């Protein structure tokens, strides 16, 4: 049985605050730890009214401090937005406080729009230096070298595990070249999944961190006691993706009974394509579909995102998923 992990954007529901969202995040992480999930990742996004995880390293520290054994990390930090030294110091601090439990997933996209990118004071062309920035970060986490001009304190010598994130072939090629684990964002951009995994496995070169390819695949999961209830809960995610297509930054909306009344046929087609790697239904339905998915992709690990509006229903979804997968 391959392991299950959690991807959380700390969604802010309509009528709630970021503080509410972050408290729900910690509560979910504590439950997922008890249910046997391997890792709990938070993602960096900026200028998004429905996402509370912008200060990703701070949110990771909050979750790690409230849990005991589950690995906690970034899925991911958008490295072009930051100096590698600052990220090394932040995650070196986290690793020092919570040794053996911190992951650092690295993305090349800005995680925001161009206006906000300028507000972050980053060069719009910074993504072109992504491979060099990853190498610099690796060096900063490695042992201090003679004559090294600057070091991460804390960070040097801690070898925080790095992951490459991606939704295209670029990340697969880089992860393979560097011998790093790879996480594919098929929970929102599934088109290149099969080709990216093939390239990653074919071109993988063993490294000090990893001796064989390890591919984690992002999916959406909404589990409930019945298929009908799960489909209704899933309408929250469908609304969110429709709003993204309309360039509307919205908070998480309550589920609706008739999603067909919310989107146009063109929006439905596009959103359904983006959400193709979604598993919605009763525990039996979800398990059967996931088993076929794992057989097809050969995934080494699954990372489930579940932006469900009601917190109790979200907890129940992850509980049902864990029970179905384990049994």
Image (cartoon, helix red, strand yellow):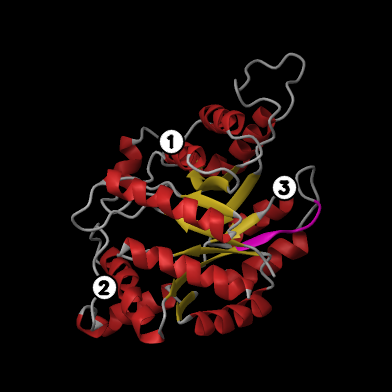
Q: In the image, is 142 to the left or to the right of 88?
A: right
Report which residue position mark 3 lands on: 178
Mark 1 to mark 3: distance in Å?
Answer: 28 Å
Badge 3 marks a residue whose secondary structure is: helix
**Dot 1 crowding, Cα within 10 Å, few <14, some 14–19, many 20+:** some
Image quadrant where residue 143 sits: top right
Q: How far across and how far down the image is residue 251, in percent? A: 24, 57
Query: In the rendered structure, which segment of residues is drawn in magenta?
Result: 211-216
Front residue (pair 195, 299): 299
User: Which residue: 77% across, 49% down?
Assistant: 210
Q: In the image, is 147 to the left or to the right of 154?
A: right
* In front: label 1 or label 3: 1
When the figure is inspected, residue 184 is found, relative to residue 153, above or below; the finding is below
Name the mark on residue 255: 2
Main SS category, magenta section: loop
Mark 2 to mark 1: distance in Å?
Answer: 30 Å
**Dot 2 crowding, Cα within 10 Å, few <14, some 14–19, many 20+:** some
**Dot 3 crowding, Cα within 10 Å, few <14, some 14–19, many 20+:** some
Badge 1 marks a residue whose secondary structure is: helix
Mark 2 to mark 3: distance in Å?
Answer: 42 Å
Q: How far across and how far down the image is residue 238, in percent? A: 32, 73
User: Which residue: 50% across, 30% down?
Assistant: 83
Report which residue position mark 1 lands on: 58
Q: Are marks 2 and 3 in contact (CB under 8 Å)?
A: no
Badge 2 marks a residue whose secondary structure is: loop
Q: How far across and how far down the image is residue 148, in percent? A: 70, 17
When the figure is inspected, residue 232 is found, relative to residue 136, above or below; the finding is below
**Which corner quadrant holds the N terminus?**
bottom right
């Amino acid at each position: 049985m391959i392991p299950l992990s959690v991807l959380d954007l700390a969604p802010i529901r309509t009528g709630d605050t970021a503080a509410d969202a972050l408290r729900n995040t910690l509560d979910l992480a504590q439950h997922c730890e008890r249910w046997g999930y391997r890792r709990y990742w938070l993602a960096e996004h900026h200028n998004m009214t429905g996402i509370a995880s912008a200060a990703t390293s701070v949110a990771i520290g909050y979750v790690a401090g409230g849990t005991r054994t589950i690995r906690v990390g970034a899925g991911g930090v958008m490295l072009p937005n930051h100096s590698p030294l600052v990220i090394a110091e932040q995650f070196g601090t986290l690793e020092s406080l919570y040794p053996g439990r911190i992951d650092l997933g690295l993305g090349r996209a800005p995680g925001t729009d161009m206006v906000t990118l300028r507000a972050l004071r980053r060069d719009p062309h910074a993504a072109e230096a992504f491979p060099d920035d990853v190498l610099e970060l690796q060096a900063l986490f490695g042992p201090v070298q003679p004559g090294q001009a600057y070091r991460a304190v804390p960070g040097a010598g801690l070898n925080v595990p790095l992951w490459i994130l991606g939704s295209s072939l670029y990340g697969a090629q880089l992860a393979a070249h560097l011998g790093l684990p790879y996480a594919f964002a098929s929970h929102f951009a599934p088109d290149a999944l099969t080709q990216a995994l093939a390239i990653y496995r074919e071109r993988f070169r063993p490294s000090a961190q990893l001796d064989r390819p390890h591919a984690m695949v992002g999916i959406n999961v909404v589990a409930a006691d019945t298929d009908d209830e799960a489909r209704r809960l899933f309408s929250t995610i469908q609304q969110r993706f429709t709003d993204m297509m309309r360039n509307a930054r919205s908070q998480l909306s309550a589920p609706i009974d008739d999603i067909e009344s919310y989107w146009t046929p063109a929006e439905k087609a596009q959103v359904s394509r983006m959400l193709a790697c979604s598993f919605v239904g009763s525990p039996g339905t979800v398990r059967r579909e996931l088993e076929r998915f794992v057989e097809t992709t050969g995934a080494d690990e699954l990372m489930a995102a579940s932006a469900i509006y009601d917190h109790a229903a979200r907890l129940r979804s992850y509980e049902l998923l864990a029970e179905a997968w384990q049994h």
